[in-house]
Image (cartoon, rainbow, N blue to C red):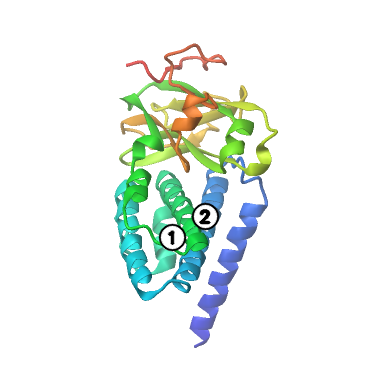
Amino acid sequence: MMRKLFFCLMFGLFMANTALAAKAFDCDNPVSDDEIAACLNTELRDSDKKINETYKALMNKLDAAAKDRLRKEQRSWLKYRDGACKLDNKESNREKWFQKILQDHKQTVCVVRFTRARTEQLDTMLSSLTVPDNDDAQNALGDNDRYEISSSVRHSKGKWYYEVLVNVGEIAKSAETTLWLGASSSYGNTGRLFNIRRKDVNQSIVRLGFGFDFDNGKYFQHTNGAWLKPPGSAEGFDMKTGHNYSAYITSSVAMNPMLANKSLQINFGDQPFAYPMPNGYRPFIEK
């Protein structure tokens, strides 16, 4: 009994410290791997809590036939989510399920994206107390082409660079958005998280730069030309070597509108960069 109590107390302290860590810095623009992990942890858990509350509220107000339709639709949504986010996590323990997903930042953003969008659908059903008898919404959510962009070339050696322009104020007018930007391989991902909130409607354009040194296993990033750590130094973020990486951006909301109005501009090197590349680096798009 005492052992069980000790475990519960320690687990509670761990969760409290994780929440406090996320509050101790700006989750709109986390920098270090630890900050990104803490913020994604908060995003994932908050979105999961909200969808469960909304689903329960809706089920409590539906008749038997509508409840049955909603259960079937929810299973369909879970299937789409798991396929689109490449989830093979069959863990029945909820905490272990969270921890498994949080090991992959790209996957976490995908799950948060699906969960937020599904919660909006459930909110609409809650307002009308109707459950649509179709899978169109789930099919749209499962279309990863709307939420992910990657370079046409991959690299395992050399030093490579790309830039992304983010019109924060313009994007904030439409929806709260989580962007994950970096490099992705089948063995892992490295990059940064960039959150845009409704309160950011007066924020200006931000230009983000990404440098990947695949020879030495280091990743560097800048905001408006100010490098967090100097490229070429040993202070960059560590990344695994020996794997083929593509430049990769994923979003919690569909990117098509942002690309269309140019509030999001991705430059893998097919256009001149806004800032000079570090010495020895080449545009990511080159072969």
Q: Is residue 48 visible?
A: no
Asked whether the residues under the numbered discs 1 and 2 touch, taking CB atoms below 8 Å apart as contact, a structural biologist would say yes
Q: Is residue 280 visible?
A: yes
x, y percent for residue 64: 36, 75
**Amino acid residing under circle 2:** Asn
Q: Which mark is residue 198?
A: none
- Looking at the image, the residue that sits furthest to the right is 202
x, y percent for residue 103: 42, 51
Q: How packed is label 1: few (under 14 Cα within 10 Å), some, or many (20 or more)?
A: some
Displayed quadrant of residue 190: top left
Residue 128 vs 259, above or below: the answer is below
Residue 162 vs 182, above or below: the answer is above
Q: How packed is label 2: few (under 14 Cα within 10 Å), some, or many (20 or more)?
A: many
Residue closest to the eye, 286 or 242 = 286
- Mark 1 or 2, nearer chain start: 2
Where does label 1 land, which residue? 98
**Amino acid residing under circle 1:** Phe
Where does label 2 land, which residue? 41
